[in-house]
């Protein structure tokens, strides 16, 4: 008996796996055409047999019997071919099912920057002196400093008239079970014309270490930027557990000036630090009895520094540096987000294991070796919303150092000039405010934005993963002004839901009130005081800086 085939049902069966994998498009089309052809041929043969029986009655002559036998034979062959086609479809559907669990999407950015800064004073070439006096003591450096034996660098300003970078990021999502999924992002971030970190790129921020991995331009290696597993719906409740390399960079409200419509990380941009850790969270639909007020709260833990295997009797008493705290989406619906986070840095290091040994030696010399120096409490929040075409936000942060006997924000200049070793064991509080707005002119494909942030003397920005190239604006102890324009390019209809193509044009002006910006070891000196000038001789320190950037970005 002939199989009854629904062409529409078959087409629907074919359509879903075709969307799952682009590589199988041609094979799927061929198989669909084969099944349609076989179905049509069977229908034609069946019609022919019916016509013969109706027109001739019982087949008694030899010729009619032969024609019917031939038709039956052809129908049998077509049935066999049709069955084989369906078997092939079943086999391929398993592969399509596997492929449909994996999603890939990504982005590419080409960026050009112009940068210039004015230093507090012309610094001495301390690194060169270290190279010639590798066994020198701090007193030797003092004698060289006061004896005029240190050579000054070229100027009291630094400039790069053009630096170009490429950044490629590939995201992956895989469903392992109904409630377990894996998410990852690989990143390549490279400077044009070199396969290493450009000289002086990290002079005023964080030297290369785990917290800057994949976030500063270097070579063309594709590094793991994020990789974590989520276990959702635990016990049938809105509870989840997550572990891995955390999504902790470019957090709110950074997505507004980056031209994106959705949140890119859990913590605020004040905590722009790639690290490994875990989180446990709970999602709710109603906040304290308020209907339709969704949000979620998380406990987060991570490791900022691993002290490795050590000999107890001979090693320095150096403990792991850990983060732990709460992350709370108080209210999150549509464009509106009210968010608060607070965490503690336990056993903060004075400096981590930097990738560059010369940098490690420099810090080791001035900070008396790698050691734990105390704890840091860090709290911040952000509120953001959209009114008609205006996106706006306001954010604030508070940091407090709680040093141990080693001290934090120690007076390096005073100790250096006087030959003393005094420490600052007082708790020091720092503050930051950050506000911004972006107006969208959808009919023109343009978005114009302004931002401003201010940091106090003892403010600490946890931002080694910043995207400002040279200096993190949110770690600045002073004022930063930024203006930018985003142009959504007229490149035709979007092929996927991830598709975006745009250019960004921006200008940043940094105006420092105090030295430093991301460090809790050395006292921040008032830019207008003599102490800052002395410190600027030992370590280049910015007074003012200007940066212009342009990007071409494609999300796919």
Image (tube, rainbow, N blue to C red):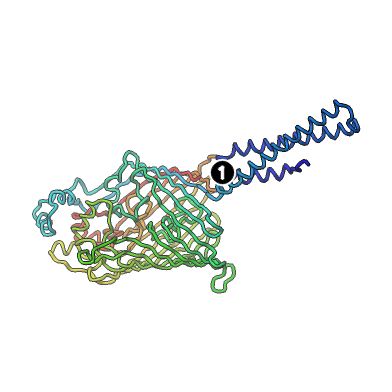
- Counting every numbered tag in the picture gives 1
In the rendering, at what x and y percent does residue 276 appear?
Answer: 39, 59
Q: Residue at x 59, y 70 (%)?
A: 291
Residue 416 in view: yes
In the rendering, at what x and y percent does residue 75 appear?
Answer: 76, 35
Query: Is 460 placed above or below 227 here?
Result: below
Quarter of the image where one finds residue 135: bottom left
In the rendering, at what x and y percent does residue 18 appear?
Answer: 60, 43
Residue identifier under label 1? 21
Question: Is residue 165 shown left or right of residue 410?
Answer: right
In the rendering, at what x and y percent does residue 317 appear?
Answer: 24, 66
The residue lying furthest to the bottom in this view is 289
Query: Is 421 placed above or below 168 here?
Result: below
The residue lying furthest to the top in this view is 63
Q: Looking at this view, is 556 or 18 the one in front?
A: 18
Q: Looking at this view, is 436 or 38 the one in front?
A: 38
Query: Is 143 placed above or below 297 here?
Result: above
Q: Which residue is drawn at 80% across and 31% down?
A: 69
């Amino acid at each position: 008996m002939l199989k009854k085939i629904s062409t529409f049902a078959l087409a629907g069966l074919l359509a879903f796996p075709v969307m799952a994998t682009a590589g199988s498009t041609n094979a799927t089309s061929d198989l669909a055409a084969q099944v349609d052809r076989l179905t049509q041929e069977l229908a034609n043969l069946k019609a022919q047999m019916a016509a013969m029986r109706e027109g001739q009655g019982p087949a008694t002559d030899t010729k009619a019997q032969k024609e019917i036998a031939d038709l039956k034979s052809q129908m049998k062959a077509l049935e066999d071919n049709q069955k084989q086609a369906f078997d092939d479809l079943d086999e391929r559907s398993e592969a399509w099912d596997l492929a449909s669990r994996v999603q890939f999407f990504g982005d590419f950015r080409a960026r050009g920057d112009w940068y210039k800064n004015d230093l507090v004073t012309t610094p001495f070439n301390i690194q060169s002196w270290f190279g010639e006096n590798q066994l020198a003591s701090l007193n030797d450096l003092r004698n060289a400093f006061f004896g005029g034996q240190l050579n000054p660098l070229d100027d009291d300003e630094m400039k790069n008239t053009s630096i170009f970078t490429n950044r490629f990021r590939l995201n992956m999502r895989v469903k392992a079970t109904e409630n377990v999924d894996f998410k990852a992002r690989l990143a390549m971030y490279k400077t044009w014309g070199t396969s290493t970190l450009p000289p002086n790129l990290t002079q005023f921020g964080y030297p290369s270490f785990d917290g800057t991995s994949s976030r500063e331009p270097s070579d063309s290696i594709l590094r793991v930027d994020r990789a974590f597993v989520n276990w959702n719906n635990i016990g049938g409740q809105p509870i989840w557990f997550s572990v891995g390399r955390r999504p902790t960079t470019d957090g709110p409200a950074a997505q507004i000036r980056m031209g994106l419509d959705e949140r890119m990380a859990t913590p605020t941009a004040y905590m722009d630090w790639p690290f490994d850790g875990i989180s446990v969270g709970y999602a709710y639909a109603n906040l304290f009895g308020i209907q339709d007020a969704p949000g979620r709260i998380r406990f987060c833990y991570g490791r900022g520094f691993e002290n490795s295997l050590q000999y107890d009797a001979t090693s320095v008493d150096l403990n792991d540096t850990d983060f732990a705290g709460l992350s709370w989406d108080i209210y999150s619906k549509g464009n509106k987000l009210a968010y608060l986070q607070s965490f503690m840095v336990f056993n903060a290091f004075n400096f981590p294991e930097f990738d560059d040994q010369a940098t490690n030696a420099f810090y080791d010399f001035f900070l008396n070796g790698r050691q734990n120096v105390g704890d840091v409490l860090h709290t911040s929040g952000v509120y953001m919303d959209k009114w008609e075409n205006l996106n706006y936000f306001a954010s604030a942060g508070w940091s407090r150092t709680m040093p141990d006997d080693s001290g934090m924000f120690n007076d390096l200049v005073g100790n250096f000039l006087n030959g003393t070793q005094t420490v600052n064991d007082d708790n020091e509080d720092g503050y930051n405010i950050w506000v911004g707005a972006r107006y969208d002119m959808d009919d023109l494909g343009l978005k114009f934005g302004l931002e401003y942030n201010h940091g106090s003397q003892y403010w600490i920005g946890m931002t080694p993963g910043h995207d400002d190239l040279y200096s993190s604006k949110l770690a600045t102890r002073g004022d930063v002004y930024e203006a930018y324009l985003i142009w959504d390019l007229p490149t035709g209809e979007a092929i996927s839901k991830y598709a975006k193509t745009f250019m960004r044009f921006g200008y940043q002006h940094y105006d420092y009130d105090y030295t430093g910006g991301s460090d809790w070891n050395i006292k921040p000196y008032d830019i207008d005081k003599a102490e800052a000038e002395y410190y600027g001789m030992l370590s280049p320190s910015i007074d003012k800086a200007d940066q212009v950037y342009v990007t071409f970005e494609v999300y796919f």
